[in-house]
Image (spheres, rainbow, N blue to C red):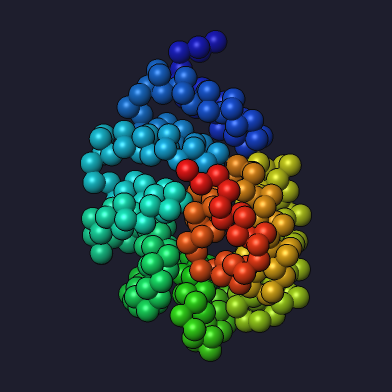
């Protein structure tokens, strides 16, 4: 009925994406952009899809088109930096992040900046940045605050401050346990609570919750978000010492398109090499192989 309507084609792109029909999704978005090439929302959705399937070069071109239309837009600059991180290009990522004003309180930007500092092994600066945000930022809800608390706890842990990490994680734990009791089928609460338990050293609780989250939203039901619950499981398995299981989970994830809740892109060999969160796996030849696959 509306063959020339870009919104219809974009909607079909999203539906096919959710069902895991990745090639069809990309094709619909390209058709939509041919009709409406300066639609920023459409460009963003198409770039998202390219990121999910790890076609990062194609995604970067679309973000550049967005930045031509909306120059110096902090959100898209940060997003582009995250794509560079996923490619292992920390130099370009750092350049972009340095151009974003420090006072920007952009959701997600702080995590990308902390990731950059972490990848550069500048843990002390990452901790300072997060502590300053927690002290100064007025969060719209306690749940949103727990996300930064968990990020701080993980960063403190990497910096060797295990005691500080547990104190920070416990602050998030109190809020998350209450939220999870009220909404036990909420996968976001389950994922974050599993992270808090992992930092606290509560292995069984962390693993049980991470595994339950994968059952609450299986990849077969949601091809975009389902696999990110497997990604969280791999992270929890790594933290609690289930190394071989974590490597097996990561091996499957590297072959799977999805939307990561940890990084801008799904897991890539570069992210496995860069992120110290995966350090407990580094001595294993099977993990080393994952880090080397598909390098260009």
* Quadrant in the rendering for residue 17: top right
| Residue 230 pos. (x, y %) | 67, 55
**Furthest residue toward front:** 285
Residue 59 position (above or below residue 217): above
Q: Is residue 132 visible?
A: yes
Nearer the observer, 25 or 91: 91
| Residue 183 pos. (x, y %) | 68, 63
Q: Residue at x 69, y 49 (%)?
A: 252
Residue 143 falls left or right of residue 81: right
Residue 270 falls left or right of residue 197: left
Residue 258 falls left or right of residue 274: right
In which quadrant is the N terminus drawn?
top right
Residue 274 position (above or below residue 19): below
| Residue 148 pos. (x, y %) | 46, 70
| Residue 179 pos. (x, y %) | 63, 69
Q: Residue at x 42, y 38 (%)?
A: 57
Q: Is residue 187 visible?
A: no
Nearer the observer, 173 or 90: 90
Q: Residue at x 62, y 37 (%)?
A: 18
**Furthest residue toward bottom:** 163
Nearer the observer, 89 or 205: 89
Residue 15 falls left or right of residue 105: right
* Quadrant in the rendering for residue 289: bottom right
Numbered-mark total: 0
Q: Residue at x 60, y 78 (%)?
A: 199
């Amino acid at each position: 009925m509306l063959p020339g309507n870009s919104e219809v084609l974009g909607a079909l792109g999203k539906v096919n994406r959710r069902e895991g029909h990745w090639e069809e999704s990309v094709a619909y978005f390209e058709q939509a952009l041919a009709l409406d090439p300066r639609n920023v929302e459409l460009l963003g959705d198409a770039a998202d899809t390219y990121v999910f399937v790890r076609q990062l070069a194609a995604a970067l071109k679309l973000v550049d088109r967005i930045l031509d239309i909306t120059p110096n837009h902090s959100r898209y600059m940060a997003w582009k930096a995250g794509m560079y991180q996923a490619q292992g290009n920390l130099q370009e990522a750092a350049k972009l992040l340095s151009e974003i004003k420090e006072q920007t309180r952009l959701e997600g930007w702080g995590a990308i900046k902390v990731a950059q500092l972490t990848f550069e092994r500048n843990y002390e600066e990452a901790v300072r940045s997060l502590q300053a945000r927690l002290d100064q930022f007025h969060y719209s809800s306690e749940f949103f605050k727990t996300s930064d608390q968990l990020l701080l706890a993980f960063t403190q842990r990497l910096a060797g401050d295990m005691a500080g990490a547990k104190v920070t994680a416990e602050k998030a734990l109190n809020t998350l346990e209450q939220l999870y009791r009220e909404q036990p089928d909420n996968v976001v609460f389950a994922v974050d609570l599993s992270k808090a338990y992992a930092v606290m050293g509560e292995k069984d609780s962390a693993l049980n919750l991470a595994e339950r989250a994968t059952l609450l939203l299986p990849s077969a039901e949601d091809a975009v978000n389902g696999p990110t619950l497997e990604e969280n499981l791999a992270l929890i398995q790594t933290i609690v010492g289930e190394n071989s299981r974590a490597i097996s989970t990561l091996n499957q994830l590297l072959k799977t398109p999805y939307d990561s809740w940890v990084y801008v892109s799904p897991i890539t060999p570069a992210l496995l090499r860069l992120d110290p969160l995966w350090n407990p796996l580094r001595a294993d030849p099977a993990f080393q192989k994952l880090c080397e696959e598909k390098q260009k």
